[in-house]
Amino acid sequence: MDALFAALRDQGYRVVGPTLRDQAIVYDDISGAADLPRGWTDEQDGGHYRLTRRDDDALFGYVVGPHSWKQFLHPPRQRLWSARREDGGTEVTAEVTPPGRFAFIGVRACELNAIAIQDRVFLGGPFADPHYQARREDAFFVAVNCGQAGGTCFCASMKTGPKVEAGFDLALTEILDDGGSRFLVEIGSDAGRDVLVSLPKTAATEQDRSVASEIVARTTRSMGREMPDGDIRELLLANLEHSRWDDVAERCLTCGNCTMVCPTCFCTTVEDASDLAGVETSRERRWDSCFTMDFSYIHGGSVRTSARSRYRQWMTHKLATWIDQFGSSGCVGCGRCITWCPVGIDITEEVRAIRGGG
């Protein structure tokens, strides 16, 4: 692993990966394998997250935490332009984002699918977001096939994991034995092949491939949640006045946690600021949430004033009208919205309740 880190740094990448901070596994700049959460795992359920020690020294023996890679490609705050009044005129300067050259370590299958969805949002169509594009263009992805499922994971039922299928440069499967961790590596791109050439390695055996395949199969069987089968888009759009929306509104705090931790949510607002002298001003884009009253505010008030309408907007967009916009569901089954909801609202259970008529 340290040889991999060195090879990526030598090629000019900024290496970002999982590390321990604030009693959680978060994504941040890391310098080597010593920064990885060796021997730690996460215990997750609705409204519950806790780190616990493993019985081994696995480097990637956890699922996903509160952070997603979105914070690096589509950061929470982004200056768009600044202006300065000078000599009787005003000079406006557009913010230019330099290339990110990120190397992301430990990306899971659900997260690769989330990044593919954000690519369609920000790069698809006739207009590309230049800030996202600059960060995304040269990104290098070291993916990891999940060796365990969390209590709120349901990627298998969304067909987005736990095995990585596309969008990676190198994919690792961590195999634990008496000698510690070793990794089966799959090449996903020419850039990945170029990095692998410089690393110490041996040819994989059929036994290695069989063990790796069983690790993924075991993870698939142990999913903590499952999204119900069927056409969820049609189900939700046909039940916009279902009594379940009132039930969830009684529990929902409209805090926006689910949208903040979601790896695909992309809603933003803009804020203008100026100095007290009125000489300099700027415009900044920041993450926003459809759970806030201001998000749907127009002249005369907010369009969605109730918790019922705001939760319904989020869930029907994520699982239904997102398909109309972008050709896929906006959910990848990572389970973050369930884990980090203070009252443990479960999106899979809400779908099941609406289908069951309860």
Image: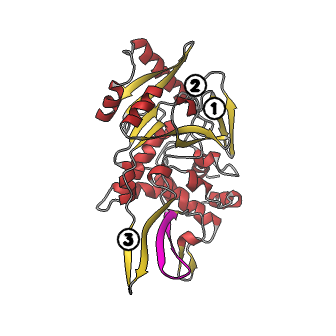
Instruction: Please indicate, yes or no, whether residue 144 appears anywhere in the rendered image.
Output: yes
Do residues under tags 2 and 3 come within 8 Å of each other at their CB atoms? no
Question: In the rendered structure, does residue 272 fall within the stretch colored magenta?
Answer: yes
The residue drawn where x is 56% and y is 56% is 259
Q: Is residue 279 left or right of residue 310?
A: left
Ranked by sequence position, the earlier of labels 1 and 2 is 1
- Residue 232 visible at all: no
For label 2, the crowd category at 10 Å Cα-Cα, with few meaning under 14, some 14 to 19 and many 20 or more, is: many
Q: Residues within 10 Å of mark 3 (few under 14, many from 20)?
A: few
Q: Residue furthest front?
A: 87
On residue 93, the disc is 3
Label 1 amino acid? Thr
Does the CB distance between marks 1 and 2 fall below 8 Å? yes
Of the two numbered discs 2 and 3 in the rendering, the one whose residue sits closer to the viewer: 3
Q: Quadrant of the rendered structure where residue 168 is? A: top left
168 displayed left or right of 149: left
Q: Does the magenta stretch mainly form a helix, a strand or a loop?
A: strand
Residue 58, label in figure? 2
Q: Earlier in the sequence, mark 3 or mark 1?
A: 1
Disc 3 to disc 1: CB gap under 8 Å: no
* Residues in magenta, as a range: 268-286
The Cα atoms of the two marked residues, 1 and 2, are separated by: 9 Å
In the image shown, does 166 or 32 lie closer to the viewer? 32
